[in-house]
Amino acid sequence: MSMPSTAGAKKMQPITRDANQPLNAQIINDGAGKQDAVDLGSGIFMSKDVSNLYLVTTPAGSVLINTGIIYSAAENKRRFDAVTDKPIRKIVFTQSHEDHIGGWPTFNTPDIETIGQANLPFVRTQYRDLGKAMGARSRRLWSRDQKQELTERPEPVLTTTFHDRHAFELGGRRFELYSVPGGETVDSLVVWLPEERIVFTGNMTGPIFGHVPNLYTVRGERYRYVQWYIDSVQRVIDLNPNVLVTGHGEPVRGAAEIRSRLTRMRDATQYLRDETFKGMNAGKSLWELMETIKLPAELAIPQGHGKVPWIVRAIWEEHLGWFRYESSTELYSVPTQSVLPDLIALAGGDATALDLAAKYFGDNAPLKALHIAEAIAPASPHYHRALEIQLYAQRLILDAAGRENFSEVRWLESEIRRLEAALAGDN
């Protein structure tokens, strides 16, 4: 097979990371600015983006795996145009998130076949119908790291869909697509090159390979089913790849290394599922399980995107739903917060309550202090002190959490900024 020119491509270069920032916040900007495509070998080229896109070349044309985000589309196309003058014949989406499909209008032509798993239109409909709500939530977490706003663009039009598997050949290369609904979206798929034993997993296991899964994302998304995730990872293990290409960073190379890391991810998730089920069957509360279930040392993989207590809660709510059998009030529209001002008044008033909140700091219980301070109404003459206690509590919670998990860090930082602004305006 003749290979394209690599004159317009570069080899993978190491990237210096900031240990004080979550990894997820840094990888989305790896492709910023004018760069060359990265030559991964075997006629495969990568363009770094919010989620990377890949061009698999053949003598008969190329297959484009994902199209990047819309505001990077022109630059991504320029990078790939520099490595081959052969046309793109097929576009494959590994999932339906904006950073995978956004560049489709820039790359698409009437002659290109666009392939996706059959659930992609279903997921895209949800995103369009909830775009305003989901966009507002995403901006709360991502505005510090992702400066450019999405713009309107045509929705991708799939010309080929499949349910479980699909295969084709182009220019002497065989491509096999497999559904992996346990990925970030139920339309997730992997692309397998059986002759080269290369698999493209996209963000099936999240944006950071080797970490615990994010079965519920704080920005707002439907739950990702734990058994589907385990089965999807197993499906990739069964392929026995020599090279695994994800949505970010360098490919993982070596069959033994890939199997070891995937197996650990699978087993860690299986452990959390089993322990959560065990606790549920024993009648333990959700809160107890979130507090007590931990990964054993041999399965203690990083938590940069997902987080163990959130996984426990996602598993619980996936299988038993939101009614926890703790109170009849769960079934109705009157929240606990609606009666807290009355309880505080009975307990001696806002000042007394805030004294208790301050005492909780001495007990190393900032979450309890936050509960009380958030119950003080804005009209209270003690509201400024309540805001100060909230701010101090949020800072303590962030310090205790460390700076590993992106959603946790960016949420707490956004709350700290909100409270600082409120206090500045209150002076």
Image (cartoon, rainbow, N blue to C red):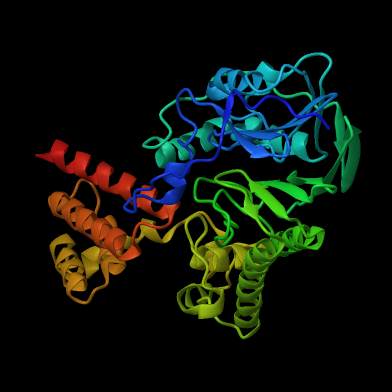
Q: Which residue is drawn at 61% across and 43% down?
A: 247
In this image, 94 relative to 317: left or right?
Answer: right
Give x and y (percent) for residue 168: 90, 36
- Where 205 sits versus 172, above or below? below
Front residue of 125 and 426: 125
Q: Residue at x 83, y 39 (%)?
A: 118
Query: For residue 249, what is the image quadrant?
Result: top right
- Where 345 sits versus 362, above or below? above
Q: In which quarter of the image is the N terminus?
A: top right
Give x and y (percent) for residue 301: 52, 67
Q: Can residue 330 be seen in this view?
A: yes
Query: For residue 236, what is the image quadrant?
Result: bottom right
- Where 292 sits versus 256, above or below? below
Q: Which residue is drawn at 59% across and 51% down?
A: 206
- Where 252 sits versus 8, above or below? below
Give x and y (percent) for residue 260: 65, 68
In this image, 366 relative to 261: left or right?
Answer: left
Front residue of 51 and 138: 51
Identity of the residue furthest to the top in this view: 110
Q: Which residue is drawn at 57% across and 56% down?
A: 214
In this image, 366 relative to 225: left or right?
Answer: left
Front residue of 171 and 159: 171
Q: How many labels does the image show?
A: 0
Q: Is residue 154 visible?
A: no
Identity of the residue furthest to the bottom in this view: 282
Q: In which quarter of the image is the C terminus?
A: top left
Give x and y (percent) for residue 47: 59, 31
Identity of the residue furthest to the left in this view: 427
